[in-house]
Amino acid sequence: GDSVTQMEGPVTLSEEAFLTINCTYTATGYPSLFWYVQYPGEGLQLLLKATKADDKGSNKGFEATYRKETTSFHLEKGSVQVSDSAVYFCALSFNQAGTALIFGKGTTLSVSS
Amino acid sequence: EAQVTQNPRYLITVTGKKLTVTCSQNMNHEYMSWYRQDPGLGLRQIYYSMNVEVTDKGDVPEGYKVSRKEKRNFPLILESPSPNQTSLYFCASSLRQGYGANVLTFGAGSRLTVL
């Protein structure tokens, strides 16, 4: 079935380091792809999205490119901050009524100063 | 402010004592959903609703009930809670689900402990 696989965490970085969180997906069609972020004690919120191959989503210095050939949507940021410490979820969704958002298991990022 | 509101945020209860977690959204969204989040398992969908009076099971519906009598509300009911339902629960909504890249708006979460 359709699924999302994320790299396991935790990922521990120093401030200003480069971040990559890998995400690959398995899907029978052409999904939209998302990154959601969950800050401590809060619900998930959308970080960025891409709806078709080669689209790049970006927000708050984070970027991810929809790569159909490698079925990937890796999250990157050039210089992380302590405030980026959170759990990051990759997810996919199809353009069909009633289809659920399918989440990866989440990757915890911890950034120290 | 557009939001999804869940109550209670924290609850400790005992096995078998019925409880309801309320969820309300003020965005006139058609689609609403409940998830549970457990360590190592990520988010799993419990139930969802495409619109008023339309609900369907997600991946882990056992032990839960829902109703959608009004567009804004989607309560989660645990008729006889058990310890394996100890979890962090999230309600979410979107304008519609499956039509384009509709974004889910999440509540802040309800942490439930069943003793």
Image: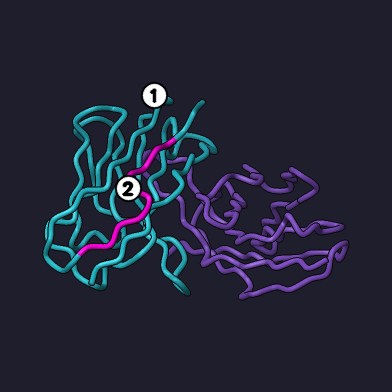
Q: Relative to residue B103, is residue B89 depicted above or below?
A: below
Q: Quadrant of the N terminus of chain A?
A: bottom left
Left or right of B61 on screen, residue B42: right
Chain A colour is purple
Q: Callout 1, which amino acid?
A: Asn
Between B69 and B96, the one lying in front of the other is B69
Q: Residues within 10 Å of mark 1 (few under 14, many from 20)?
A: few
Q: Chain of mark 2?
A: B
| Chain in cyan colour | B
Q: Residue visible at 62% across and 52% down?
A: A35
Dominant secondary-structure state across the stretch colored magenta? strand
In terms of secondary structure, where does tag 2 sit?
A: loop
Q: Relative to residue B52, is residue A20 depicted above or below?
A: below
In the rendered structure, find residue B107 and report the number of the disc placed on it. none
Task: Identify the residue under disc 2.
Answer: B8
Q: Relative to residue B112, is residue B103 depicted above or below?
A: above
Between A32 and B96, the one lying in front of the other is B96
Q: Relative to residue B69, is residue A79 depicted above or below?
A: below
Gap between marks 2 and 1, in whole Å?
A: 22 Å
The location of residue B36, given as percent across then percent down, is 37, 59
Q: Specify the segment rendered in magenta.
A: B4-13
**Picture quadrant of residue A39:** bottom right
The location of residue A8, given as percent across then percent down, is 61, 75
In terms of secondary structure, where does tag 1 sit?
A: loop
Q: Residue visible at 25% across and 42% down?
A: B75
Q: Residue visible at 18% across and 51% down?
A: B65
Q: Residue visible at 81% across and 59% down?
A: A80
Q: Earlier in the sequence, mark 2 or mark 1?
A: 2
Q: Callout 2, which amino acid?
A: Pro
In the rendered structure, find residue B28 and report the number of the disc placed on it. 1
Q: Quadrant of the C terminus of chain A?
A: bottom right
The location of residue A32, given as percent across then percent down, is 57, 46
